[in-house]
Image (tube, rainbow, N blue to C red):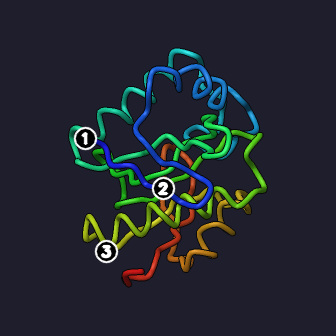
Amino acid sequence: MIPELITPRLKLRGFMPDDTEPYIAMMMDAEVSRYLGDMKPLSRIDAWRQLAMMAGHWVLRGFGIWAVEERESGRFIGRIGCFEPEGWPSFEIGYTLARSAWGRGYAREGAGAALHFARTKLGRRGIASFIRPANAASIRVATSLGAVHDGEVELLGAPSLVYRYPDTAG
């Protein structure tokens, strides 16, 4: 059972079949994907595989990435959550939103809820976000939640900045 997180404007929930098409469209958008993975849009098949991997992450790790739903409209707007697949540098809070949801504070709101969940429900410490150096918007989200720059790692063939969240509950 995937827990739901409710914020004033968002519902973070498990992915549903109706999320498939908007998820694929989001991941095929070159603007959305320019700082993710190999920094190229995903094909339809690769986006579906990624969606399946995120569903499996919940089964194998007991935590994962949630689908993000705008509460007012009920529409799918992205993905936010806890991520630590095999070989990943450390436990991560990740966030990706469809372009139509940018600039509204949704990433901060949802990532804040995921961070709180990771600290209080999972008891995690050493939480990070891995962000491509040019992704100023994601850096703003991480720092607004208290993360500080803590080095650089190579991730999926390109450098990523490590933004580490303080080990405090809240």
Question: Where does label 2 land, which residue?
Answer: 6
Q: Nearer the viewer, residue 165 or 161?
A: 165
Q: Which of label 1 and label 3 is nearer to you? A: 1
Q: In the picture provided, is 28 more to the left or to the right than 102?
A: left
What SS does tag 3 mark? loop
Q: Distance of mark 1 from mark 2, alpha carbons?
A: 16 Å
Which x, y percent locates residue 165? Answer: 46, 76
What SS does tag 1 mark? loop
| Amino acid carrying mark 2 in the image | Ile
Instruction: Give the residue at x 54% y 44%.
Output: 68
Question: Where does label 1 land, which residue?
Answer: 1
Q: Distance of mark 1 from mark 3, alpha carbons?
A: 23 Å
Q: Residues within 10 Å of mark 3 (few under 14, many from 20)?
A: some
Instruction: Give the residue at x 63% y 39%.
Output: 77
Which x, y percent locates residue 125? Answer: 31, 74
Question: Where does label 3 land, which residue?
Answer: 125
Q: In the picture provided, is 124 more to the left or to the right than 11?
A: left
Q: Residues within 10 Å of mark 1 (few under 14, many from 20)?
A: few
What SS does tag 2 mark? strand
| Amino acid carrying mark 3 in the image | Arg
* Pointer 2 or 3: first along the chain: 2
In the rendered image of this protein, does residue 59 appear above or below residue 113? above
Which x, y percent locates residue 156? Answer: 49, 43
| Amino acid carrying mark 1 in the image | Met
